């Protein structure tokens, strides 16, 4: 296949695509790939254009040798740094004997990674918010079972505080349930028929 035709084909693909020769030099790259990797140009070594990491270069070599598709994570350093799930597929060097090439496609996983981090932070914050009233209620119960056991005035005071902390927890759980309902409804297909 001629290089111009190859470039036209991969330029039509919306995800970054890079084609490497058997010496791991760039043969072709689409516009999306050039936007992501600033040093990407024909003839440049992949270690300069995309990543110098040994694990990445070694995976490329393995695919050239055993002709088996592999996936690897590639992180960029430009800008805010993106994380890509990269698929490496062998191309050519079949029975006709042409030099083997590799096709790399890059799927941006940055947004997914950010969402996971936000969820993790959210769970940590909610856990902290729920733990605080639980700790307070636990302390009030210990006090009521111990020193304030026979003190009606202290019992009224601590029971009022426990009611307040319980109401706070109920509000938190209610908010969590509301959020979960929103997520469920967001994925639900509309049932109404519209003109």
Image (tube, rainbow, N blue to C red):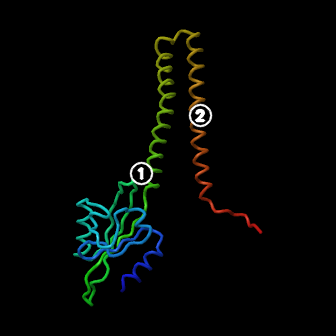
> Which of the two marks, 1 or 2, is nearer to us in this view?
1
Is 68 left, or right, of 151 in this rendering?
left
Between marks 1 and 2, how big is the CA–CA gap? 39 Å
The number of callouts visible is 2
Closer to us: 117 or 171: 117
Q: Earlier in the sequence, mark 1 or mark 2?
A: 1
Residue 137 vertical position relative to residue 13 in the rendered view, above or below? above
Q: Quadrant of residue 91?
A: bottom left
Q: Quadrant of residue 153?
A: top right
Q: Which mark is residue 80?
A: 1
- Pointer 1 with pointer 2, Cβ within 8 A: no
Find residue 69 and report its horizontal and vertical position in percent.
Answer: 31, 73
Is 99 left, or right, of 110 in this rendering?
left
Residue 111 vertical position relative to residue 31 in the rendered view, above or below? above
Q: Residue at x 61, y 50 (%)?
A: 182
Closer to us: 75 or 87: 75
Q: Residue at x 38, y 54 (%)?
A: 78
Residue 134 vertical position relative to residue 41 in the rendered view, above or below? above
Q: Residue furthest right?
A: 195
Q: Residue furthest bottom?
A: 96
Closer to us: 48 or 105: 48
Find residue 83 and report its horizontal and vertical position in percent.
Answer: 39, 57
Find residue 189 and report its horizontal and vertical position in percent.
Answer: 64, 62
Q: Residue at x 59, y 54 (%)?
A: 184
Q: Which mark is residue 194?
A: none
Find residue 95 and report its horizontal and vertical position in percent.
Answer: 26, 89
Label 2: element kind:
helix
Label 1: element kind:
loop
Which class describes the residues within 10 Å of circle 1: few (<14), some (14-19), or many (20+)?
Answer: few
Q: Which mark is residue 170?
A: 2
């Amino acid at each position: 296949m001629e290089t111009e035709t190859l470039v036209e084909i991969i330029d039509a693909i919306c995800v970054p695509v890079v084609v490497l020769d058997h010496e791991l030099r760039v043969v072709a790259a689409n516009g999306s790939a050039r936007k992501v990797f600033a040093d990407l140009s024909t003839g440049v070594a992949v270690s300069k254009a995309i990543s110098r990491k040994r694990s990445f270069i070694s995976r490329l070599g393995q695919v050239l040798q055993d002709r088996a598709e592999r996936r690897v994570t590639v992180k960029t350093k430009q800008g805010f740094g993106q994380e890509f799930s990269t698929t490496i597929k062998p191309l050519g060097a079949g029975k006709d004997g042409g030099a083997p090439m590799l096709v790399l496609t890059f799927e941006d996983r940055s947004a997914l990674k950010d969402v996971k981090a936000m969820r993790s932070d959210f769970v940590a914050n909610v856990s902290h918010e729920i733990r605080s009233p639980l700790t307070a209620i636990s302390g009030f119960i210990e006090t009521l079972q111990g020193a304030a056991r026979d003190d009606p005035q202290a019992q009224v005071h601590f029971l009022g505080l426990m009611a307040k902390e319980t109401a706070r927890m109920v509000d938190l759980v209610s908010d969590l349930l509301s959020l979960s309902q929103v997520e469920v409804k967001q994925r639900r297909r509309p049932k109404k028929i519209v003109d």
